[in-house]
Amino acid sequence: MNFFRGAAVIAAKDLRSELRTKEALNATISFALAILLLFSFAFDPDADMVKQISGGLLWLVFAFSSALILNRSFAREVPNDCLDALISSPASGAQLFLGKAAANYALLLVVEAVALPVFGIFYDAHWTRQLGLLVLVLLLATWALTVIGTTFSALTVNLRLRELMLPALVYPALVPALMAAIQLTNVLVGSDTLDRENYIWFRLLAGFDVIFTLLGLAMAETVFVG
Amino acid sequence: MPDGAATVQIEGVWKYFGDYPALRDISFDVEAGACLALLGRNGAGKTTLLRILGGLSRPARGRVRVLGGDARTASVRERIGILGHGIGVYDELSATENLEFHARLHGMRDPRAVALHWLERTNLLPVRDGLAREFSRGMRQRLAVARAFLHEPMLMLLDEPFTALDDRAIALLQSLLAGARSRGATIIMSTHQLREALELASDVALILRGSLAYRGERTPEMLADAGWLYRHYGEKE
């Protein structure tokens, strides 16, 4: 079976499962919106403050709420020993990883697509002024979140305390990507122009994505089979 | 796989859980077309061995060849069918969606047709669009059997296949196993239900505390007296 077709079959199954139950999606969107709402009441930020905190606020919301979707990714395979059925199928560990990651990526992008306009309304932020570049940051940083989260979701799937272990493992590993995403989002939402120094953060994000995607694909077989 | 070669070759396999050796130097072959009953008490290592044969785990030491290759190669795994303790179907998907998904994973040409064919064979066609979580236990078991057999595997690995099955599912499984043997498939099943297993088996392996205690053909003595093997080769109480 073609490598990408196998991954697509797994991704389609995960998306179908999630869209039918909406367990993780509803919880994640509710959580993200609740944090945005609470912060807007807590700080009542003016335009200058929004410029300073928009990146940090958005990416903390995305990172923390994503844990719900990432946890469900492999936890969904635990009842009925579905993970064994997947691992024993002709799909390779790398296909399984990529399929799961693709489904998680799509779900996280949906959460961000809902949360961003709400952020704009609550904080009176003009986030669409450099929409193209902001979308690029979202795509790159969300993929970073996805590959790290999917890898650790697979590693922790059989742990009793996986809901606690996943964030403890994911967030430290994500620090470089989150720093880059926060810096770039601050500039783009604050309507500043990107200078040469800012492009280093783009390169960092792209490099992070490539390295951890390759690592995830290479380690998948060991993670699943030992 | 060359003609005459064993379907399964196990050489000096060890497996540890922590420091505890769950399998100790297991070696035996299973010929093509054989039906091997893998016997042993709880914790003997039967499931561990089946998991290694199915590519779900790796041995710490030793070598395993399945259908002429490594169990983790895709070409080998697409010819293995596993029916384990869990049914391996998704509660939130319909019966058709579950079987279609597994047919797609096995690269089958018309996954929808395959799914419908197996739903018909397992008498689940009338509830094809029902979610698995809404099924009775017996229906879920039949769906699991369909999932394990739909790609017509040449090696079936069954872990306690008759446990918790209802009469209809047992009859279905027995007929599918007979069909698999008639097309030359090899069957390895671990079980506590000695009588049912010995009636189906052509060969027997007995594992005691991770070590192979007996490996040979099933004999008339075993069939006549299901406890014969344990009395002659089992641990003394």
Image (spheres, rainbow, N blue to C red):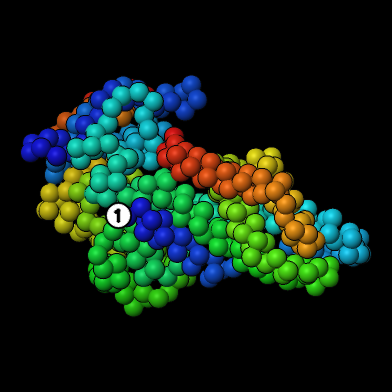
Amino acid of disc 1: Met
Please tell me which residue lies in front, A43 or B114. A43
**Residue ID at (50%, 57%):** A102
Q: Is residue A178 visible?
A: no
Q: From the image, tell me which residue sits under label 1.
A: A1
Which quadrant would the N terminus of chain B be assigned to in this image? top left
Using the rendered image of the protein, determine whether residue A6 is visible from the camera's viewpoint: yes
Q: In this image, B126 relative to A164: left or right?
A: left
Left or right placement of residue A210 versus residue B28 in this view: right
**Residue A177 percent across, percent down from the top left:** 66, 46
Considering every residue shown, the one lying at the far bottom of the view is B126
Q: Quadrant of residue B146?
A: bottom left
Residue located 39% across and 68% down the image: B97
Q: Nearer the viewer, residue A191 or A100?
A: A191
| Quarter of image, res B60 | top left
In the rendering, at what x and y percent does residue B55 appear? 34, 40
**Vertical position of residue B83 compared to residue B69: above or below:** below
Q: Quadrant of the C terminus of chain B?
A: top left
Picture residue at 26% right of the left edge, 71% below the top: B113
Element type at marker 1?
loop
Q: Where in the figure is residue A205, as x and y percent of width and height?
A: 62, 47
Other-residue count near label 1 (Cα within 10 Å), few / some / many at <14 / 14–19 / ≥20: some
Residue at the front extreme? A196
Of residue B136 and residue B107, the one placed in the foreground of this image is B107
Q: Is residue A206 above or below residue A57?
A: above
Q: Residue B45 location, x and y as percent?
A: 37, 32
Q: Nearer the viewer, residue A32 or A85?
A: A32
Numbered circles on residues, count: 1
Identity of the residue drawn at 34% across and 66% down? B100
